[in-house]
Image (spheres, helix red, strand yellow):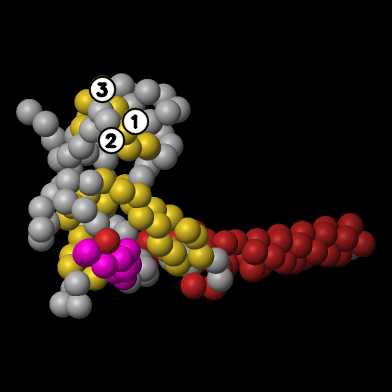
Amino acid sequence: MEDEALTTRRRFLSRVSLALSGLAGAVVGVPILAYLLSPLLEPAPDQWRDVGLVENFRVGETVEVAYDDQSPLPWAGQTARTAVWLRRSNETDFSAFSINCTHLGCPVNWRADAQLFLCPCHGGVYYADGSVAGGPPPRSLNQLPVRVTDDQRVQVLPRPLTQTISRA
């Protein structure tokens, strides 16, 4: 009888221990999963970023413009300074390209004399229109939407366009 009571008590304590361990795992795991999945479940809203007046950009010139990009996680409280390559094609048309190489995300440099974007890390080369000229990049630079407001301000949407530029 004493052995039966001991076995029953062990089984009970074992099950209580497993239940408390599972509860502790859920208490720790649920917030972590919510943190990791929140950008997928609730993506950041599209926010156009002001990069300057139209008159500040010369036709045919490609320049790096920086802006504050707020974190997509509002509770993080962090902002990041980021940039894009902005090219003014004519009086009304602008193109914006991500500053990051599509190979491994290194920042690319614009070489005005050669009219090329160069990745100094792994030798990626892009034409002025963002298409791949050589090296390891698997695809063109990400092109970003650009608009000009009624008060002649140039704005960039930090999310890339869905299509990419390809050179035949």
Residue nearest the observer in this picture, 77 or 134: 134
Q: Position of residue 114 (x, y in %)?
A: 25, 28
Q: Residues within 10 Å of mark 1 (few under 14, many from 20)?
A: many
Q: Nearer the viewer, mark 2 or mark 1?
A: 2
The boundaries of the magenta stretch are: 46-55
Spatial separation of the CA atoms under disc 1 and disc 3: 10 Å
Q: Determine which residue is flagged by label 3.
A: 134
Spatial separation of the CA atoms under disc 2 and disc 3: 17 Å
Q: Residues within 10 Å of mark 2 (few under 14, many from 20)?
A: few
Residue nearest the observer in this picture, 10 or 46: 46
| Total number of numbered discs in the rendering | 3
Q: Is residue 52 magenta?
A: yes
User: If the image is split into quadrants, where does the C terminus sit?
Assistant: top left
Q: Determine which residue is flagged by label 1.
A: 118
For residue 112, which numbered disc appears in the image?
Answer: 2
Q: Quadrant of residue 124?
A: top left
Q: Earlier in the sequence, mark 2 or mark 3?
A: 2
Residue at image location 17% in from the left, 68% down from the top: 148
Q: Looking at the image, can residue 11 be seen?
A: no
- Which residue type carries mark 1? Leu
- Which residue type carries mark 3? Gly
Q: Is residue 139 above or below residue 28?
A: above
